[in-house]
Structure formats: C-alpha cells, structure tokens
Amino acid sequence: MSRSGADLALLLLGGFRTLVDSAITELAAAGFEDARPVHDFAMRAIAAGADTASELGRSLSITKQSAARTIAVLQERGWVTTGPDPRDARRKRLEVTPLGFEVMRTGEAIFDRLREEWAARIGPAELEKLEHHLTTLAGPQPVRFDSPGWLAQDTTG
C-alpha cells in the first residue's frame, strides 16, 4: 500500500508527538509538571549563549516579547536566573540554573528510555535503520533552536 507525502509528514509528526507526550507525562511524574518542549529549546539556547531576551528571541525565531514571557516562566520555575554581565555592569545575562540542567538531563534520560521501548517494539536493528534513513533525509542536525518560532510562524502576511 502506497501512502501520500502528506501521510508521511503526519506519521513523522505522530511519532514526534507520541515521544514528546510520553516524555511530558514522565517529567510531570518526576516533579517537573509544567515542562514543555519550548522550555527545553529555550534553556538549550540560553546554555549555548543566548543570554538576553533579544538573543533568545533571535535564536528561537520568536518575538522579543515571546522570549520575555518564556524567560519569566523559566525564572518562576527556578530553571533560569539572571546574573551580572562581566562585560557590562548595567546588563543582566540569563543563565540556566542547576535545577534547569536537571530538568534537561531528566528529559534526556526519559527520551533514552522511550527509545529503548521503541527498539523493543520494532527491534533494535529496525530502529537503527529508521534512524539512519531519517538522518540521510533530514541531515545530522534535523532540529534547530528556531523550531518553536518556525512552528508558530504566521504565513498569512
């Protein structure tokens, strides 16, 4: 049975959604009830050097206002804090806290376990083959930090 290109896109999205929904549920059980994919993208971007709202917005391809709202949520949860900028005393720079890094590490461990479950369901060789083919098609770095902005982009204007 041949599927359409749209079916393929939906299957890939469904696989992503299945993994993410499971991870969010498990993160909640681990005490991180409000963790969402955008939070992980934001913390990874901050850890990689996007240490202001403007830089985070550019990195995620979202508005500065959206970045500021995301930062406020991350600060409220204790996952990100601000510290003095060693280059400019007037400026505060964003930093991922130890708790923020714990959220990311916990999520990574959950995704590793979910991958093992998929390997058990279809076989390790089949999963490795699937990953190989997806890497061939999408490239070695298929998702960039700007994915949240890309997903939410307004294509009407």
Image: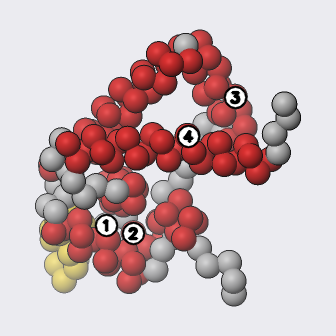
Q: Which mark is residue 133?
A: 3
Is there CB contact under 8 Å for labels 1 and 3? no
Mark 2–mark 1 Cα distance, whole angstroms, equals 7 Å
Q: Earlier in the sequence, mark 4 or mark 1?
A: 4
For disc 1, the marked residue is 51
Q: Residues within 10 Å of mark 4 (few under 14, many from 20)?
A: few
The residue at the point 39 percent across, 60 percent down is: 38
For disc 4, the marked residue is 15
Q: Amino acid at mark 2?
A: Leu
From the top left corner, tell me how far across and down residue 26 is, in percent.
27, 40
72 shown above or below 138 = below
Q: Amino acid at mark 4?
A: Gly
Classify residue 82 by image quadrant.
Answer: bottom left
Mark 4–mark 1 Cα distance, whole angstroms, equals 32 Å
Q: Quadrant of the C terminus?
A: bottom right
Q: Earlier in the sequence, mark 1 or mark 3?
A: 1
